[in-house]
Amino acid sequence: MQAVEMSLTVVVVLVLLALAFDFMNGFHDAANSIATIVSTGVLKPQHAVAWAAFFNVAAIAVFQLKVASTIGKGTIDPAIVDHYVVFGALIGAIAWNIITWYYGIPSSSSHALIGGLAGAAMAKAGTGSLVWAGIGKVVAFILVAPFLGFILGGTLMVVVSWLANRSTPRRVDKSFRRLQLVSAAAYSLGHGGNDAQKTIGIIWMLLLAAGTLKTGESVPMWVVISCYTAMGLGTMFGGWRIVKTMGQRITKLRPVGGFCAETGGAITLFMATSLGIPVSTTHTITGAIVGVGTSKGPSNVRWGVAGSIVWAWVLTIPASALIAALAWWIGQLVL
């Protein structure tokens, strides 16, 4: 990969912008990790975000950088990457995150970033700049991740309900209030492991393009630590607007349902991260919550709310791509 001439100031500014996206990712997606545990009353919001943030950062010791590699090499052609492409991609993703956060819509930060990368790359070099195999995996998992979450969450709810059939509701709630701490921790590990690596991949791509790193060199540890820390801090300041939508407006959750949704979501995230596939934590937990609600009967799910979330999913990649293409053009004027 041939290095692109760019000043140290530009590299530093873009690294800071990437970390700002990472912070926004944690802030925007904090609801995915804490919505069920807050809505079921197991933890207060301020305790829940601290719990989730700790395990977001702890994921640094659990997962290999396979998702970062996919983002850095498997979505757009590394040869066309320069500071304008990185700038466009990040602005597209950040702008869409702010829009959806403001309106309380649980959209995907991950797909906003993929859309941003695709939009900026196409603005520079057309559709030939896309790595279709990698893009295809991401698009496929738009359906696969929530479907797996739905199946696992619903199945766990059925199994747990059968096993706890002879226990009183109060005793079941008491047991699963404790277990939900474990399931929320597992989900937060999966969230940190998959999502922080997306920003690592962007910075890796930038450093290779700038010639700071040579092809084949591993990601510097300061990048890894910075990205996980930024995500954890973002989660600490997480957005309450989306928590209400995720935790109670889709379906009414009790601790047992929260445990099943988080566990089903966590299993899905662990599988995807181990395969190096960037997935949406938003899609995953939404699918799991709907699966838990449906296991008690389709009428327990507020399908109108779920439908509005699906529309946000459909719009995320094209909307962030369009913003990124515009930002790529602006970047050539200001960088």
Image (cartoon, grey):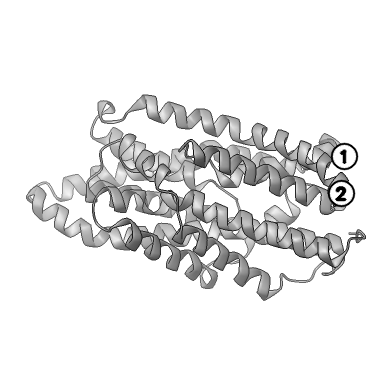
Q: Residue 293 in the image: x percent, y percent?
A: 29, 36
Element on which disc 1 rests: helix
Q: Position of residue 226 (x, y in %)?
A: 62, 69
Q: Earlier in the sequence, mark 1 or mark 2?
A: 2
Residue lying farthest bottom? Answer: 221
Is residue 11 visible in the rendered image? The answer is yes
Q: What is the tally of numbered marks visible in this picture?
A: 2
Residue at the spot 87% in from the left edge and 45% down from the top edge = 333
| Circle 1: residue type | Ala
Reading the image, the residue beneath label 1 is 125
Tell me the residue at 47%/36% (across/down). Answer: 105
Residue at 70% across / 49% down in the picture? 90
Q: Amino acid at mark 2?
A: Ile
Residue 154 x/y as whole percent: 32, 41
Crowd band around label 2 with a 10 angstrom C-alpha radius: few (<14), some (14–19), many (20+): some
* Residue 67 visible somewhere in the drawing: no
Cα distance between the residues tagged 1 and 2: 7 Å
Relative to the observer, which residue lies in front, 249 or 163? 249
State which quadrant residue 229 falls in: bottom right
Residue located beneath label 2 in the image: 80
Label 2: state its secondary structure: helix
In the depicted structure, whether residue 243 falls above or below residue 316? below
Q: Quadrant of residue 183?
A: bottom left
Q: Is residue 9 above or below residue 34?
A: below
Query: Badges 1 and 2: C-beta atoms under 8 Å apart?
Result: yes
